[in-house]
Amino acid sequence: MDRAALAAFLRRRRAAVQPADVGLAPGARRRTAGLRREEVAALAAMSVDYYTRLEQQRGPQPSEQMLAAIARALRLTDDETDYLFRTAGRGTPDRIVCHPHVAPALQRVFDRLQDTPAVIMSCVGEALVANDLAVALFGDHSQARGWERSEFYRWFTDPTSREIYPVADRDRHGRAVVANLRAAVGLVGADSPAGELVRVLQAASPEFVELWERHEVARRYEDHKVLVHPEVGPIELDCQVLFTQDQTQSLLVLTAAPRSADAEKLALLSVVGQQEMTRSR
């Protein structure tokens, strides 16, 4: 770990990112060029003290997950991300694996989606980033650890994860989850995290084993779905998915027909979500 190089790089990249680049208001009294330390820390979901110590050459060696979060917060390119990992003494990310570093181009599209649920997913069903409406709709799993971060894993190990879907749609969605995971294994290999998740679920869920043996493969989500929210009830939404070039990450965008009852429910959900966030603080 080259502490001096890492600290200098972080300071330079932080100064190069403008608030508007990450969806923040520029403000009239900003003295800092680029982002403030506390803004980078918030975007990376880490403490301000931890991030400050990295910039001051005093911090411990960051984990790969922490480095990926910093790279996402600073909107680093692939080359810049590789440099960040190397200066921190870590191996560079493999571009054809299920890695938590969000593709910069996908992140830029995501940053412009504030009025409709949007989430960037890894190839093992982890929500890498989600906007406020997506959190209000699907719940907040950002603090989960291990396989609990994966929607694929939760579907087969936590019955409450299915409550967001109508009973009549749950079998179809379970098949879609397994078909997506099989496509991921075909893409990144059996020795990847996707292959490991398959082995974990084979040991944990007879239902998964039965569906896995169907050998269904699909990368697309349903184009139309009904989701059930405990506060606003059923919401009919259209679903669009944008994949990265290597197909390892996807941006899921959910929209309701304009001026429909479902659009009104989404608007109400944004209010409910803000109230939940206020109560949790």
Image: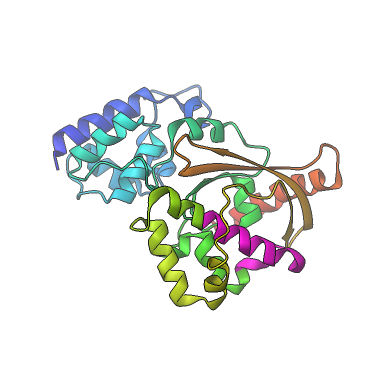
Viewer-nearest residue: 90 or 23:
90
| The stretch drawn in magenta includes residue 165 | yes
| The stretch drawn in magenta includes residue 70 | no
Residue 191 vs 89, above or below: the answer is below
Q: Which SS type dominates the magenta stretch? A: helix
Q: Which residue shows up at 57% across the image and 65% down it?
A: 214
Is the image coloured rainbow, by chain, by secondary structure, or in one colour? rainbow
Image coordinates of residue 204 in percent, x first then y, are 47, 76
Which quarter of the image is occupied by the N terminus?
top left
Viewer-nearest residue: 89 or 10:
89
Residue 227, quarter of picture: bottom right
Q: Which residue shows up at 78% across the image and 51% down it?
A: 236
Image coordinates of residue 246 in percent, x first then y, are 44, 38
Image coordinates of residue 179 in percent, x first then y, are 56, 57
Q: Which residue shows up at 36% across the image and 31% down it?
A: 76
Q: Which residue shows up at 68% across the image and 40% down it?
A: 116
Image coordinates of residue 72 in percent, x first then y, are 40, 38
The answer to whether residue 29 of the structure is visible from this angle is: yes
Number of marks in the rendered image: 0
Q: Which residue is at the far right?
A: 260
The answer to whether residue 125 of the structure is visible from this angle is: no
Relative to 161, 54 lies left or right? left
Relative to 108, 197 lies left or right? left
Residue 156 vs 6, above or below: the answer is below
Q: Give the range drawn in magenta.
A: 161-181
Residue 182 vs 261, above or below: the answer is below
Residue 196 vs 246, above or below: the answer is below
